[in-house]
Image: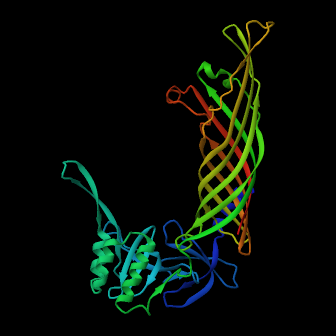
């Protein structure tokens, strides 16, 4: 619970060493909020040596930034006459003869011979009828036409513009090459250049997990499972993890790839009467698997404690899936039971898929990270379903797991 409460608190205190640039050109050093508000037009600033926080809008500043990291400049956003133009903070990716910006996921370029004119880079869809008389859609690459017009003073760029993707790395590389082509390389600044485009942080992870196994049946073939109450299972798991992200694009978002090994055992002894016969059952289940998890993780602010949340999916790939079932049938309550062997080595599928969500916090230790996380996992059909059973819902099964995980990232 304390982890979840820390998440909004961290968002409120997301300040890093930075600077603001006043309209007159003066630069003030201090602590700057790492995110703007939802409209992209307001930030918080704490001047060095002062405790008070000042809020600035894009009307008040020429820009702000963080040394060696992001830089923002105030630009005029024109809504193509649908709304009045407004001042906003745009993240500056490259500054030079041709400058590149991004604002709320949309890229803009600006040439220094017309510094107040922003050119939006975008793609639209066009509906047309193809040669087979079928209505289809195709992309209209407005960004290619815009860039060709702005870069026409460097003939070598034309073929490269045709292949450019509407993505940060592709556009940054293109703009840098153009500025170098026309002799502006020395006057060019690329922000976040010290940050990697791609980074991998490996780690070890262990957990204590509490898992329940559940069945629901509408077919008399599975009545023994409908009546079974399996024990819950507390068991250890362990494995490795990788955090993949692009610090250059977003330091806070990463992809978690994790592999953990676990083994479970379940027992149940359901008894019931069915059509004037009496049934006693002994069911034993042994499962062992490697759990492969892929999730999107988002980190919040924090120096020593850094909360995070993640959500994604997983696959359990089973190395053991034993299903032992002995059934005892009596015609009367006092008659001698008949023993039936109902073992089925193919009852469980080779793989189970599911969804997961979790929240936790990092403990930052110099260049290493210790993580503590609470996670919930819902595993879908565990048994190997025939197609007809999927249609009739003859049998449903699931696993529900609550885990506490401890990780160490190098």
Residue nearest the viewer, comparing 321 with 397:
321
Residue at the extreme right of the image, as rendered: 334
In the rendered view, would you say 323 is above or below 271? below
Q: Count the marks.
A: 0
Percent of width and height locating residue 27: 56, 89
Percent of width and height locating residue 342: 68, 23
Quadrant in the rendering for residue 54? bottom right
Q: Is residue 182 left or right of residue 11?
A: left
In the rendered view, would you say 349 is above or below 8? above
In the rendered view, would you say 307 is above or below 101? above
Whether residue 126 appears in this view of the structure is yes
Whether residue 97 appears in this view of the structure is no
Which residue occupies 45% across, 74% down? 169
Which residue occupies 69% across, 69% down? 302
Percent of width and height locating residue 220: 61, 18
Q: Is residue 309 left or right of residue 268?
A: left
Percent of width and height locating residue 175: 39, 81
Quarter of the image where the C terminus is located: bottom right
Which residue occupies 41% across, 87% down? 96
Quadrant in the rendering for residue 365? bottom right
Which residue occupies 68% across, 26% down? 343
């Amino acid at each position: 619970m304390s982890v979840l409460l820390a998440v909004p608190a961290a968002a409120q205190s997301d300040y890093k060493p930075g600077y603001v640039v006043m309209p007159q050109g003066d630069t003030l050093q201090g602590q700057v909020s790492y995110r703007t508000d939802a409209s992209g037009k307001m930030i918080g600033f704490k001047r060095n040596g002062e405790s008070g926080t000042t809020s600035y809008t894009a009307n008040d500043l020429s820009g702000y930034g963080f040394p060696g990291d992001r830089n923002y400049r105030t630009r005029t956003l024109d809504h193509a006459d649908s709304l009045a133009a407004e001042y906003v903070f745009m993240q500056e990716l490259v500054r030079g003869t041709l400058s590149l910006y991004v604002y709320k996921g949309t890229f803009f370029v600006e040439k220094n011979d017309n510094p107040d004119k922003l050119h939006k880079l975008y793609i639209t869809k066009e509906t047309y009828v193809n040669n087979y008389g079928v209505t289809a859609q195709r992309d209209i690459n407005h960004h290619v036409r815009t860039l060709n017009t702005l870069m026409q003073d460097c003939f070598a760029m034309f073929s490269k513009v045709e292949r450019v993707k509407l993505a940060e790395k592709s556009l940054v590389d293109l703009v840098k090459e153009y500025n170098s082509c026309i002799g502006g390389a020395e006057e060019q600044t690329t922000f976040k250049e010290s940050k990697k485009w791609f980074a991998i942080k490996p780690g070890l992870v262990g957990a204590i997990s509490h898992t329940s196994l559940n069945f629901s049946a509408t077919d008399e073939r599975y009545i023994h499972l409908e009546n079974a109450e399996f024990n819950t299972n507390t068991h250890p798991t362990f494995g490795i993890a990788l955090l993949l992200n692009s610090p250059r694009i977003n330091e806070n978002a990463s992809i978690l790839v994790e592999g953990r090994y676990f083994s479970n055992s379940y027992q149940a002894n359901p008894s019931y009467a069915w059509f004037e016969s009496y049934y006693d059952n002994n069911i034993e289940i042994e499962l062992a698997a490697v759990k492969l998890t892929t999730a999107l993780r988002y980190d919040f602010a924090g120096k020593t404690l850094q909360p995070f949340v993640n959500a994604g999916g997983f696959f359990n790939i089973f190395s053991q899936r034993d299903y032992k079932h002995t059934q005892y049938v009596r015609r009367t309550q006092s008659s001698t039971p008949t023993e039936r062997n109902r073992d089925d080595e193919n009852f469980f599928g080779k793989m189970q898929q599911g969804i997961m969500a979790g929240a936790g916090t990092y403990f930052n230790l110099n260049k290493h990270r210790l993580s503590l996380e609470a996670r919930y996992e819902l595993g879908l059909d565990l048994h190997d379903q025939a197609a007809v059973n999927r249609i009739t819902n003859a049998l449903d099964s699931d696993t529900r797991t609550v885990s506490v995980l401890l990780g160490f990232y190098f």
